[in-house]
Image (cartoon, rainbow, N blue to C red):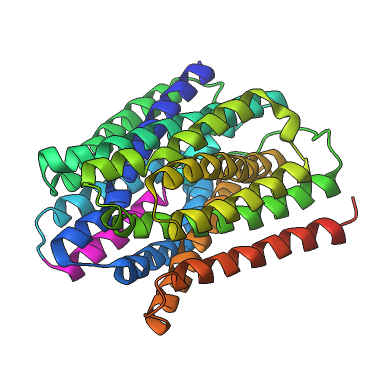
Amino acid sequence: MPRQLKTGYFVIEGLNSFGTTYYFYYFYFFMQQQFGFGDKANLLLAALNGFIYVFAAWWGGRFAQRAGYFTALKVGFAIMIGALLVGAQLESAAGQIMVMVAAVIGMCFTWPTLEALVSEGETPLGLQRMVGIYNVVWAATGAIAYFIGGALLDQLGLRSMFFVPATVFGIQLALTLWLERGVRSVPSAPTTISPEPYAPRANPRPIARTKMFLRLAWLANPFAYIAINTLVAVMPGVAQRLELSTTQAGFFCSVWCFARLGAFWGLWFWPGWHYRFRWLVTSYLALLGTFVLILTVPSLPVLVLAQLVLGAAIGLIYYSSLFYSMDVGETKGEHGGIHEAAIGLGNFAGPAVGAASLHFLPHYANSGALAVSALLLCGLGGLLTIRFKTKT
């Protein structure tokens, strides 16, 4: 049945979140310990990651829309498996950077595709349920990967950051092939093989208002990822300042992931936040304040408490972007690609600004945090401008 097939998509999604989180979040710890990369170098790596992601995600969504969802998944998993197996054999920093770039490109074939697969053919009520499950699944497995990743690296060694996710991606590839055979035996579910035209459903909300919120969310989400990718890149430095081991860093620096998971769970069951500007702008203000606290207050209790608020704020902002992307448009593969490309834009801009500040103002320890905070303030201005200049 099509609904049973979607359960399979959620399994693949959860595995994808675990594997990609384990590799990309601990890549910065790997580069720090293997090659002595500090905050500035890791921020530059994060900026490169985001820059590649912008274009690869946009193109990956278009590829999925045209070539078919399963084709895109198979290409993405194959690229990531190959890249990580090569990475496990390399001993140079330049080689590892190229492996990261290849893995980013491979990943960009997967997320827009999975978002489209779980959303295709849904009514507005069904879409709310599917997006809710989707967000809870990837947030839960990603949080687990970040939480236990440090302990796994300590127990299995740094090279496990290649073999563990490569194994996960191999399982995903096998599941994809199995599901593809199952889908082809279900004549009533053609859109799960490749996106094909079907009768558009009527959206009960005013079109001007829905498009405004889509623009708001597409602006807010990359700014949220400006904060996320900046924090992830400098977490090895934060852990070092707080004298945390890699295992402890995994425990204490993953709090925001679990807070985001809790937010996704609550927002899934409570639709009252849909198309409400005050919820979006309040979350953005909380994001801004907690970002500054985490990077400027060298205290473990503050780090944990700020992450709880940060995760809740990021949860609503991300949920808004994905929900409005799927709710407003019918070309879900392409809209998923735009949603992910916006994430890549944030992943690039935040670390790039942070690295530039540390380069030109090396004597000011908090220059990177303040520069990225100023960038986040620009995002707040953009949200207010869109909201009050749009007639709804």
Direction bottom: furthest residue: 360
Left or right of residue 58: residue 47: left
Q: Name the residue: 32% across, 50% down.
A: 25
Q: Indicate whether 259 appears above or below 53.
A: above
Asked if residue 248 is positioned above or below residue 136 in the image, the reply reads below
Q: Residue at x 58, y 54 (%)?
A: 289
346 or 312, nearer to the observer: 312
Which corner quadrant of the image does residue 197 belong to?
A: top right
Considering depth in this image, is 106 or 276 the residue closer to the camera? 276
Which residue occupies 36% across, 70% down? Answer: 44
Q: Main secondary structure of the magenta part?
A: helix
Q: Is 211 or 224 nearer to us in this picture?
A: 224
Q: Is any part of residue 116 visible from this angle? A: yes
Q: Is residue 105 visible in this depiction of the protein? A: no
- The segment highlighted magenta reads 92-110
Q: Is residue 219 above or below residue 167?
A: below
Residue visible at 56% across and 65% down in the picture:
373
Instruction: Where is residue 350? Give x, y as percent.
Output: 49, 65
